[in-house]
Amino acid sequence: MRKLSFTLSLLFCISILYGQSPHGKNFVVDCSKCHTTEGWKVDLKKLLFDHDNTRFKLAGQHKAINCRSCHKSLEFATSKKECLDCHSDLHEGTLGPDCSRCHTPKSWIVENISEIHRQGRFPLIGAHQLADCRACHISGSTRRFDPLGIDCYDCHKANYLATSKPNHQQAGFSTNCVQCHKAGSAGWLAGNIEHSFFPLTAGHDISCTLCHTNGSYSKITAECFSCHATDYNAAKDPDHQHLNLSHNCLDCHTTSPKWKPAKFAEHDGRFFPVYSGSHSDTWTSCTDCHKQTGSYAEFTCIDCHEHDKSRMDNSHDEANGYQYNSLACFTCHPTGREEGGFNHSQTQFPLTGAHTSADCAKCHIKGFAGTAMDCNSCHKAKYDQAQAPVHTTAGIPMQCETCHSTIAWTPSSFNHGTTGFVLTGGHSRIAQCADCHKGIITEAKRTCVPCHQVQYDNARDHRLQAFPLDCLACHTVENWQAVTFDHALSKFPLTGAHIRVDCALCHKNGYAGTPTECNSCHGTNYSTAQNPNHAAAGIPVVCETCHNTTAWRPSVFNHATTGFALSGGHSTIVQCSLCHKGTVLNTRTECIACHQVQYDNAKDHKAQSYPLNCGMCHNANNWLNATFNHSQTGFPLTGAHLTTLCAKCHINGFQNTPNTCYGCHASKYNSTSNPNHVTAQFPTNCEACHNSTAWTPSTWNHDSQYFPIYSGKHKGKWTQCSECHTTVSNYTVFSCIDCHEHSNKASVDREHQGKNGYAYNSIACYNCHPRG
């Protein structure tokens, strides 16, 4: 019976496999890898199927999830393997489709932020390593990571504008922050300022404002005297001004925090050794020897320590030409030593090094007059006999001092850097010049390949692939074998996905003349693109306009560069073809070009001749929320106009609507009787007396221009203009004597008895009482 059951099960499996398998016709895995004869239910503990043999190896969290979480359908052959097939793109396309650049199957938590940043345009160094991602990626809270600018100023503009010590704006500082600050430092501190143009050493390690006194941080002169003129003028020991000493302070002083003691360093070499030899530390002030403060050319030797005349006379009794005076002392003892000697430093050939102990006769063979001063005149035999290298055949010049010094003839001290080819790395370990200079040093090549042609020819693919002959593009002088080509030194730095591309994919025809434009490699992508059809739409072949090296999709075209930034409702448009009907060339940017239908269907737009400039009332965020800004016209709305219906003014549409008060309020002008504007011939510029808040009361300023009737004694004493202006057609005529206490002539005459020039008429009243 058991055998029969097994047979039936086996037959059932076969029927399923070759008949109606739930896993689809393309699934050929043995059923027993997952199922048993005991039933179709899969026991995961007894599962023999190895997922690692499929296109998708299980790792991390994928090992622990239920199969049906990924395989929604039992047709396993149709399952997809890309992350985005199962996981929603929370970054909304801003980081490309390759999730593995940041995430691993182990966890969604990103553990290598710094490493990821090094692959992009902005490696994290200094304080950026500890910064919160959201401080730069402002949209990071919604998990979008849109491309950012990489200049410091893009993020730190607020720091630049807020800085007051010094005020960067007023000082005209560059917005290129790295000119003063170090990107790798932990903060903006002044200690990070790059001040190599004037090293802040010793005493110059002070507050910036001590030198930059006027608030300007533009370049100032590096001359000491520009800051220390006061110190120069105040110096009395010696008196710098009186002696007209050099303004080059560094002749005597250093940048140490102490201005004193000064040390005239050239005194020992050019004149007399006072800082070395027997005179070192035996004096304290220049005036110890230079008694004549007005002239430092004068000096005394016989006024100090052991120079007693009687003793000096006795000790020099056999000295030829001896005299007891300072000049004679210096002539025989130019270095301050007891033994006499000739002061060779006063000639054109000061003695240095081994020359100081040489016998005079070795150089002055034919006497002292006309002795040659060039090295070769004495050392020609050494030049002729030199073997490493052979000077004569190598064409080495006869200027011995180029390689040798007076200290010792060997070893030579030739500075190869003066040739323009510094010996570093492996070159610094070369023992013999002849290893590079094959018999001659003139016209020696400075490029690598003249010496390393053999290595180039024997190297794999160098000739076949037409590698450039500039060896240093890949090799270093430190280690020939350590090849590290820095593509950034070429005209095409590698970024994004290009970093991991095999060289041969781009350099198919060798390394010379490889094109750098994207379309040269991605022409197929361009010609096959359908959304939109690039060729039909006339999209330029400059791929980098829309695409980047991180991922070909999604494209990141910055529409703002066209002069039409996508904002509001425009930013949610998915397909370019919704606006660009078949072409991207010469696309109109005015609203009406796309929204003519909305204009035609809108209430009153055609009837009222609304302008075709939709942006005057509508915005891209909400088409229906129309808010026209009347201040953009020649008639800003104020006062009561703010609540007036448009149709009350725009009776005949929106074109040629009058913008003067009289244009709308002529009827009020004509019907006004107090005063009668027409009869009084008032001007039609209503705003002279009225405002938009209310038509009445008028704002005619009678008090300041003419006679105070709204203030003073006449306030509240009248109701109609005609009470004073009795001639209704002429407001220049007025009456003072027809009202209240002025109507009784006899009473007014008594009050003005004795008043010079008094007359009982309105003009006279006004002349004496212009303010009432």
Image (cartoon, rainbow, N blue to C red):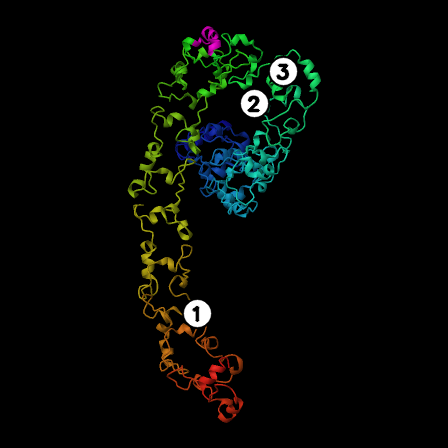
* Residue annotated with mark 2: 270
Spatial separation of the CA atoms under disc 2 and disc 3: 24 Å
Would you say 18 lies left or right of 264 here?
left
Identified by mark 3, the residue type is Tyr
- Quadrant housing residue 639: bottom left
For the residue labelled by badge 1, is the local secondary structure a helix, a strand or a loop?
helix
* Residue annotated with mark 1: 643
User: Which label's residue is closer to the chain start, 2 or 1?
Assistant: 2
Q: Nearer the viewer, mark 1 or mark 3?
A: 3
Magenta-highlighted residues:
376-391
Spatial separation of the CA atoms under disc 1 and disc 3: 118 Å
Q: Are marks 2 and 3 in contact (CB under 8 Å)?
A: no
Q: Residues within 10 Å of mark 2 (few under 14, many from 20)?
A: few
User: Which label's residue is closer to the chain start, 1 or 3?
Assistant: 3
Q: Which mark is residue 207?
A: none
Identified by mark 1, the residue type is Thr
Spatial separation of the CA atoms under disc 2 and disc 1: 95 Å
Identified by mark 2, the residue type is Arg
For the residue labelled by badge 2, is the local secondary structure a helix, a strand or a loop?
helix
Image coordinates of residue 522 in percent, x first then y, are 35, 34
Total numbered badges shown on the rendered structure: 3
Q: Which mark is residue 322?
A: 3
**What is the chief secondary structure element of the magenta stretch?**
helix
For the residue labelled by badge 3, is the local secondary structure a helix, a strand or a loop?
loop
Q: Residues within 10 Å of mark 1 (few under 14, many from 20)?
A: few
